[in-house]
Amino acid sequence: MRRPLALAVVCVALLLAGCQAPGSPAEQTPLGGDAGQTDAAATPTEPAVDLAVNGSAPDAPTADRLGYENGYWYNESLAVTTEDGLNETEREAVVARTMARVERIRGLEFEETVPVSVVSRAEYRNSTGGGDTGESLRRFDNAKFEALFFVGEDRDSIAVQSSNRGESVLGYYSSRRGEIVVVSDSETPTISRGTLAHELVHALQDQQFGLGSDANTRDGVQGRNGLIEGDAVATRQIYSERCAATWECIETPTSGGGGGGDRHFGISFMLYFPYSDGPGLVSDLRERGGWNAVNDAYGDHPDSAVEVTYPARYPEWERASVSLADRSSADWERVRPSTDRDRPDYAVVGPSAIAASMAYTLADDYNDSAVVRTGDVINYESDGSLRSEDPYNYDLPATDGWRGGRMHVYANGGETAYVWKTRWDSEADASEFARAWERVVVHWGGSQRADGTWVIADDSPYADAISISVDGRTVTVVNAPTAAELDEVHDA
């Protein structure tokens, strides 16, 4: 890997890694990143309580009001310091005022107080270590991440995701327990105001709209989370702007979000998608109809990453239904990830994951090639600094026309294989993706045989055989341990 490029990518990864919770459990809504939509907030119509002038807090209102929670007004001064952490009393005051401020920005009322608990980083690592996921789910997940060229057969995809998550999370909201959990290395933790505001937005979303949904594939979750995280990041950004302009705010601690661990740039890039592109969707909705349009979207959340990357396509865009017949020989058995949970027995790998796979070729240490340039996937300001509001770009020519997809995983003893079929808006889009994916295969050591199939070098983490075929607007990728077994996995 070229050292200057490696350092640039690592710096981006470290800047963002402490501000996300990659692959967190289903009931957790992790904190967002530093990205945010810079726009003016819609101010609720009740009169402001100008404590900067009054110098003391007025009496409690006779009825609950936006901007007042648990004895604290949204612009009330607090006599707390963060240098030595926050004790329980200080934490309650900070949480109450932050709830009032989130209400003030979003124009929505908390229905109940949000408890905040603290766990050590060691406790969090233990609770998110992957656990007993079951052999079928593990094999299915490994094959899916191998198909994206994220995790080779010599590593475990769930372990890699858990390592990312365990070292980078600062806090999360658990919808199952209705509480915020702060991950800290001290008994009296500091709480970043951005982290707290972000997670309180998730609690507010849960109380007002519910965070449950029928999104059960990778692409479906990316669409749903684009709205959820985009809302939280945009609100957090407005919060920060008001701290800089009119609100008295506690200084944000400078401590990082853990350290070390196995931070995987490709997986982090994929999982950061809702935080990077979600605020753009929220901004678009607010231009259409203010915060009410954002609220309405919870009843019809985006179905795909497509509607988040391209907000103008929401809500009319619909994912194409892609059929994929099982045409394997008797030696190859379909791997179904779970029989005791409500989830499909196939994967839908969408454009944000494809873009992440292409971006990862900039940061891996396999060789010096890449299928994209740094500026294609990382957004910079004119002065060369990272664009904090929108650090990553997922709108690539090879992903723009994605319309739908379906992936099946197969096993033969200790070997796995997969068939991945995608549908595109046009034949030109399909051909463009196929050519781009061939470049990804070449990057990872692939060479094309006379019959058109690809064989990846033995020293590659992905030493297998692959066929890539285009039929009109569909592209089918078949993977098997050897070229001779491709037809056994999927007899085209």
Image (cartoon, rainbow, N blue to C red):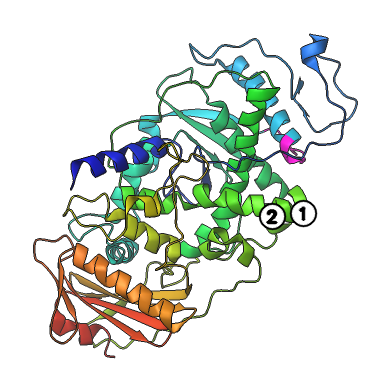
SS of the residue under disc 2: helix
Q: In the orientation shown, which residue stands out farthest toward the left?
A: 458
Comparing 387 with 163, the one in front is 387
| In the image, residue 353 above or below residue 269 | below
Give the total of numbered labels. 2
Which x, y percent locates residue 284? 66, 54
Q: In the orientation shown, which residue stands out farthest toward the front?
A: 382
Give amino acid for label 2: Leu
328 vs 248, left or right, is left
Residue 338: tell me if it is visible: yes
The Cα atoms of the two marked residues, 2 and 1, are separated by 6 Å
Q: Give me the disc on residue 289.
A: 1
227 vs 26, left or right, is right
Give amino acid for label 1: Gly
Q: Check contact, mark 2 vs mark 1: CB within 8 A.
A: yes
Which x, y percent locates residue 364? 23, 51
Residue name at image x 67 percent, y 24 percent: 245
Residue name at image x 72 percent, y 52 percent: 287
| In the image, residue 227 above or below residue 389 | below
| In the image, residue 438 above or below residue 300 | below
Locate the C terminus and report the quarter of the image it occupies.
bottom left
SS of the residue under disc 1: helix
Residue 217: tell me if it is visible: no
Please rate how many residues cluster around mark 1, counting C-alpha atoms within 10 Å: few if below 14, some from 14 to 19, many from 20: few
Does the magenta-highlighted stretch encompass residue 417? no
Which x, y percent locates residue 220? 52, 64
Residue name at image x 61 percent, y 67 percent: 313
Residue to which mark 2 is pinned:
285
The part of the chain drawn in magenta is: 105-113
